[in-house]
Image (cartoon, rainbow, N blue to C red):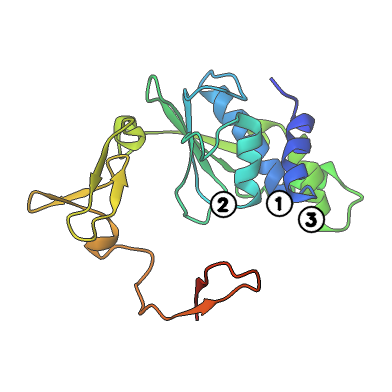
Amino acid sequence: MQTLQAILEISSAQHKHLCPRQVLGARIGLAGAAALGLDAPRSDKRLLIFVETDGCFADGVAAATGCTMGHRTLRLADYGKIAATFVDVKTETAVRIAPQLDIRHKAHAYAPDETKHYYAQLVGYQQMPDEELLTVQPVRLTTSVKQVVSRNGVRVNCAHCGEEIINEREIIIDGQPVCVSCTGSAYFEPEELRFFVVHHHNSQPGIPVLK
């Protein structure tokens, strides 16, 4: 198992700095794996993590656990919270870990001479024991691990737009597979395409660019 300092070096190298949320991510990542009795960082897919925000916190979790979106072992449930749920894929045991509500106040006890809250938190979050820093709550996923992970090689085409859907994320409507976008639940709305063509001085074909 890597030390906290080694994990923070990995995380901070990606950001060019170290911040309190990276520390919380690393601490929560280590605590989540430990709560499930799993070693970290991992190179397999035994551990599945749902982080509840992105940014520095998520990078701290990834550095501590080895879980990434690319390996489909790290997922974003964007609730805007510094918290994460850790799932043992083999047993489907799950725990949600979050900071205790008063950790900003408690951090000052670990850096009594620090006048700036930011730096007191940076020091305090590294030194506070887990039982003072974190809450650990056993939970049950509302979607099974099997549904979340899906199966390799499964793909269909949306009956409306024709685009390919992988990982069994289609919705069946009137017996036909439909993508989430076409059900009206998309995160975007189509607009009229307005292109102009940029011509290069080296006579390469023009490239269409959005106006």
Can residue 116 be seen here? The reply is: yes
Counting residues from the start of the chain, the first of labels 3 and 1 encountered is 1
Q: Position of residue 28 (x, y in %)?
A: 61, 36
Q: Helix, strand, or loop for circle 3?
A: helix
Q: Position of residue 100 (x, y in %)?
A: 60, 44
Is the Cβ of the residue at disc 1 closer than 8 Å to that at disc 2? no
Q: Helix, strand, or loop for circle 2?
A: loop
Please state if 158 lies on the left or on the right of 173 as rendered.
Answer: right
Quadrant hosting residue 159: bottom left
Alpha-carbon span between mark 3 and mark 1: 9 Å
Alpha-carbon span between mark 1 and mark 2: 20 Å
Label 1 belongs to which residue? 104
Can residue 100 be seen here? The reply is: no
Label 2 belongs to which residue? 54
Foreground tag (1 vs 2): 2
Label 3 belongs to which residue? 118
The residue sitting at 52% across, 68% down in the picture is: 205
The residue sitting at 47% across, 25% down in the picture is: 45
